[in-house]
Image: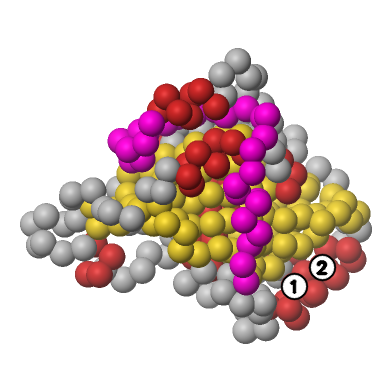
């Protein structure tokens, strides 16, 4: 399955916000990105508390239909189609001291004039002289496992165009989350299948947003969404045998590391989809 290149490569007059920026990860011209957004207002869209769950099953299409049926039986109202595109790129030439340098570009249908770029570096284990990813098993976490350095950029479509045109990174893998969005009381729920290398879905994601809560708090917040998932999926991430998982183990720690702010926004959602992509593409 190939994602249409225009999702990431055409120009726009929208804004490009580059905070927080880790230019040491990118080694590209900050001036070029700044000039693409000069005199433009940054668009920030706040959301409610959001968590993205991954769901594994031997028959994804059947499980997808079962979840759709279950949420409609619960009384949820269908809002419309929901799509998230994600692309992974790898650096052409690694900087000394790094085992891996990647960039993930993500675009969500509910905010499709913005691109989210996540840059992550894995350092070389100098004491052993080996690459981290070759000597250790794959992390069960999409981002907060092996990545030593990580940052998130939010930019307009022209900013994404610049990131790709500098040709420091090469496209490696494309993926798409696609499904339907439902409104259930104060909950906004998106149920999607994930397709990466072929037309056959290889995973599921369930995004649950609780709209009344917009402030990033403590781990107790997750209990509400975990309870909702236990009703919808008849399972909970707290159960080790559950097919429902969280792609990021220490999500609040990652939010803090990336300096995403104290109020939930699409940035907080985007980083979770990048982590889900990083797990489900394998």
Query: Relative to 114, is 42 above or below?
Result: above
Name the image quarter holding the N terminus.
Answer: bottom right
Mark 2 burial class by Cα count in 10 Å: few <14, some 14-19, many 20+? many
Q: Which residues are magenta?
A: 1-29
Q: Nearer the viewer, residue 35 or 106?
A: 35
Mark 1 burial class by Cα count in 10 Å: few <14, some 14-19, many 20+? many
Q: Position of residue 149 (x, y in %)?
A: 33, 44
Query: Relative to 181, is 115 above or below?
Result: above
Q: Position of residue 251 (x, y in %)?
A: 49, 47
Q: Is residue 3 magenta?
A: yes
Query: Relative to 256, is 3 above or below?
Result: below
Q: Main secondary structure of the magenta part?
A: loop
Q: In the image, what residue occupies the spot 91% across and 54% down?
A: 77
Q: Check if mark 1's residue and mark 2's residue have beta carbons within 8 Å.
A: yes
Note whether residue 102 is visible: no
Question: Furthest residue to the left?
Answer: 127
Q: In the image, what residue occupies the spot 60% across and 48% down?
A: 8
Query: Relative to 59, is 49 above or below?
Result: above
Q: What mark, if any, has residue 68 been given in the picture?
A: 2
| Residue 3 appears left or right of 252 | right
Instruction: Name the element at disc 2.
Output: helix
Q: Quadrant of residue 231?
A: bottom right
In space, the residues marked 1 and 2 are separated at their CA atoms by 6 Å
Tag 1 residue: 64
């Amino acid at each position: 399955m190939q994602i249409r290149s225009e999702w990431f490569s055409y120009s726009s007059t929208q804004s490009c916000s580059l905070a927080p920026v880790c230019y040491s990860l990118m080694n590209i011209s900050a001036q070029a990105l700044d000039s693409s957004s000069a005199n433009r207002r940054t668009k920030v869209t706040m959301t409610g508390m959001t968590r993205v769950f991954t769901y594994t099953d031997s028959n994804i299409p059947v499980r997808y239909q079962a979840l759709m049926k279950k949420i409609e039986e619960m009384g949820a109202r269908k809002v419309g189609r929901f799509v998230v595109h994600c692309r992974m790129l790898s650096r052409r030439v690694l900087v000394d001291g790094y085992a891996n340098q990647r960039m993930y570009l993500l675009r969500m249908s509910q905010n499709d004039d913005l691109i989210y770029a996540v840059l992550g570096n894995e350092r070389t284990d100098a004491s052993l002289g080996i690459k981290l990813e070759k000597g250790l098993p794959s992390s069960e976490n999409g981002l907060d496992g092996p990545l030593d350095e990580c940052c998130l950029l939010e930019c307009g479509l022209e900013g994404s165009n610049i990131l790709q045109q500098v040709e420091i990174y090469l496209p490696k893998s494309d993926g798409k989350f696609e499904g339907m969005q439902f409104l259930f009381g104060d909950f906004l729920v998106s149920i999607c299948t994930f397709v990466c290398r072929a037309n056959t879905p290889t995973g599921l994601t369930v995004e649950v947003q609780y709209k009344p809560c917009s402030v990033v708090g403590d781990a107790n917040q997750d209990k509400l969404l975990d309870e909702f998932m236990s009703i919808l999926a008849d399972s909970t991430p707290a159960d080790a045998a559950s097919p429902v998982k969280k792609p990021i183990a220490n999500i609040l720690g990652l939010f803090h590391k990336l300096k995403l702010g104290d109020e939930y926004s699409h940035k907080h959602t985007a980083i979770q989809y990048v982590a889900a992509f990083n797990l489900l593409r394998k």
